[in-house]
Image: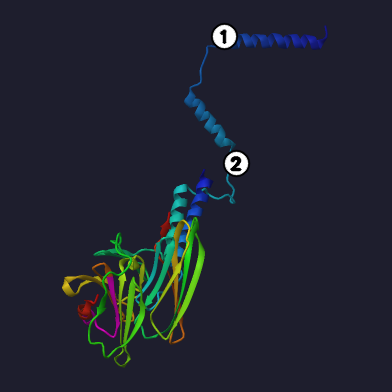
Amino acid sequence: MKKLLSVLLVVCIMMGICVTASADATDTYDLSNASKTSYLTIASNKATCTSRFVSTDSSIQDITIVATLEKFSFLWFWDSLREWNMTYYDTSSGTLVNEMKNLTSGTYRLKSVFTVKYKNGTKESVTVYSSEKKIA
Amino acid sequence: MTDDITIAQALEAELRADIQTYDKLPQYKVPRSLDKRISKLIRNSDRVPKTKWQHKPVSLRRRLLIAAIIVAVMAVLTGGITVITRNLGSFTVKQYDVFSMLTISNIEDSPLILTEKYRLVMDDSQYTKKVIDDYEFTSTMFYSDKANGKYLCFSQSVKGMYETVRLNTENAITYPETVKIDDNRNAIYFETYNHEKVLIWELDESIIEINGSGFSKNELIELSKFVKKIE
């Protein structure tokens, strides 16, 4: 009985670590911009994926946004359905909007990875997940 | 008759006499508690003494405590601990160690497209303007005045876009707080470590956000007065 509880505990710990890591731990320091948005809407089995990066920081040179539409698989695993990316040169703001049609039933989310290159050559990345949307 | 037969008969007679004596003894039942105690004593005496190589068994309570400590340490290391959760009007700000997550609560039944359009209506001749995006659910305009080091970003979005917004509050000069703006409205204000100031507020069925660099807090609040409905 105690062994079984120990195994369950280890599994719970591993799950907790993985979930925490997937949610927030893609970086240890935040980007210098003020706000980042990952926005997913689903209507008539069509997903609209919006990743927005808005900043007035003049030290930013380029922004790269990588947006991935993910579908829930099992436990804490998500399958990548489609990926879009765009680099915005000589600007500190950018919005990436894409669509994907013919979605089947399931739970979806948008993963947005914002990578900023500063004029001094340094780079930073931050991942923001949208809230989850379900198709019955 | 041999000697062996004689000895056997003598032993048999002796044994029979003993059995008869035993049968004459009064009946005695051992109490159950005494029986248990005796059994326990026998079990303990049978145990092998512990060697140096044997580990002391860890109790389940202690194992749970160790597991909780590991989870807490890992959560701190991975930045997953919520430090403060604050309700600022219809917004909720969950403040973590190096960032904050902003969410809006009343988005049920809110429109998915902008039904009314708002813009900054002011003398913007000193700024170079650039449209960042212009969709039916969000529009963003960037104003830059490089000569004076002033940069401004105005956006209007549907409420749904503020379901998950990550704010940079790492070493923030001002953490998200409520301030009064035009028409006695409440807005969220915060200032990042590099002096980028942000105002976010609810306006009808949309959310307005103004980001500014090179402006003071009061100047940014004054700018909010220039947000006017154009359609």
Is residue B73 visible in this depiction of the protein?
no
Give me the residue at 31% from left, 71% from top: B157
Query: Seen in the image, is A17 located left or right of residue B164?
Result: right
The residues tagged by marks 2 and 1 sit, at their Cα atoms, a distance apart of 42 Å
- Name which quarter of the figure residue B214 lies in: bottom left
* Residue carrying label 1: B24
Q: Are marks 2 and 1 in contact (CB under 8 Å)?
A: no
Q: Quadrant of the N terminus of chain B?
A: top right
Mark 1 residue element: helix
Range of the magenta residues? B207-220
Give me the residue at 47% from left, 51% from top: B63
Q: Amino acid at mark 2?
A: Val
Q: Nearer the viewer, residue B134 or A57?
A: B134
Q: Quadrant of the C terminus of chain B?
A: bottom left
Query: Seen in the image, is B55 located left or right of residue A110?
Result: right
Please tell me whether residue B164 belongs to the stretch shown in magenta. Answer: no
Q: Amino acid at mark 1?
A: Lys
Q: Nearer the viewer, residue A55 or B44?
A: A55
Provide residue B146's location: percent of width, then percent of height. 32, 91
Quick check: B7 above or below A33?
above
Quick check: B18 above or below B50?
above
Quick check: B128 above or below B225?
below
Few, some or many C-alpha atoms within 10 Å of disc 1 (few <14, some 14-19, many ≥20)?
Answer: few
Give me the residue at 36% from left, 77% from top: B133
Provide residue A70's location: percent of width, then percent of height. 48, 64
* Residue carrying label 2: B48
Mark 2 residue element: loop
Q: Chain of mark 2?
A: B
